[in-house]
Amino acid sequence: MNIILAMVAAFFWGTTYAVTQYSLDGWPPLLLGAIRALPAGLLLLLIKPSLPKGKDWVVLLRLGAINIALFFGLLFIMAQTLPSAISAMGMVYVPVFAMCFHWLVNKKKPAKLQLISGALLIVLAWQLFDPQKVQLNGVGLVAMLSAIGCIVIGSNLTQSLSNRIHWWTVLTWQLILGGSLLAILAALQATVYPAQYSNAIGNVSVLNTIGLLWLVILNTALAYSLYVWLLSRMTVVEFTFAGVTNPIAGILMGLLLMGESFSLHQYSLMAAIILTSLLSPLFAKYKHRKTLKRVEEPSLSTAK
């Protein structure tokens, strides 16, 4: 059941790009980030009130700035500038960036299979994102790489807080603080580009409202709650398996909502990237089961 819930959360995250392009085209990324984060955080606070301790405010503000404010802003730049399928496929590379981060910062050398899998993913990415085969927005690609970096750094910060602060408090207040930062930045940007904001806010349609409710309730309040709640109930391997629904959702929603289509070669590359991303966790799960079997066999012999 846990793996299914994690797949649901990852699937909703994968719909962000197409839903934004389809229902909120032209809306400023900072405004979208603020609307997505702040109401979701306040809703969670209403469901279960919590308040950080004095010394925790600074670290939660830092987490909200990276994990929510910066990440959400970059995410909506991607959603406005890149095809849904391409944006979702980019998120598959989070484990590769995390592997490099831990290798460089924590001096934790990855296993050989992780290195091979990471190298293969880079080669496949070069083929998929080849500018001679597909025209992609440079700003969107920079936003994608920066967003992946935010995920890696934010995840490390979140993990460091897991033993100090209750998960609900971390979840709720990073959304509230990060959303508040985005709201301030959006307000400042609105003074410079008022037409962009007045066009968005002054002409809210039913489609816009549905898109916003999807982002706030399903993509953020529900999906983030599931994710944080499941962190203590699942292994990293299981989470990696669940994450495969993210790019699948991006490809499907891009096709259904935006009519995005790619060549058979490009779809084959996407499938190869998804399968390659599963190589390392599949092998890790196999080794884990093999180790458990070895441990159980002597116990059974002793019992006899």
Image: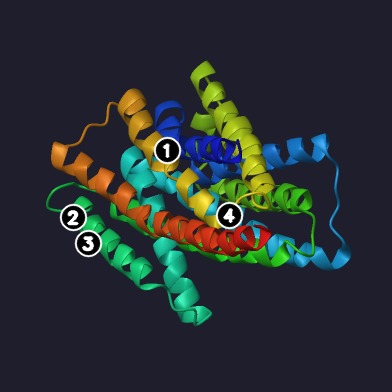
The structure residue drawn at horizontal position 79% and vertical position 55%, both measured from the top left corner, is 166
Instruction: Mark 1: give few (<14), some (14-19) or many (20+) Cα within 10 Å.
Output: many
Location of mark 1 (residue): 17
Q: Quadrant of residue 257?
A: top left
Between discs 1 and 4, the one toward the N terminus? 1
**Residue depth check, mark 1 versus mark 2: number of the one nearer the observer:** 2
Q: Nearer the viewer, residue 182 or 237?
A: 237
Location of mark 4 (residue): 235
Between discs 4 and 2, the one toward the N terminus? 2
For the residue marked with disc 2, what is the amino acid?
Answer: Gln
Between discs 1 and 2, the one toward the N terminus? 1
Q: Is residue 50 left or right of residue 238?
A: right
Quick one: quadrant of the N terminus? Answer: top right
The structure residue drawn at horizontal position 42% and vertical position 38%, both measured from the top left corner, is 17
**Residue depth check, mark 1 versus mark 3: number of the one nearer the observer:** 3
Q: Quadrant of residue 42?
A: top right
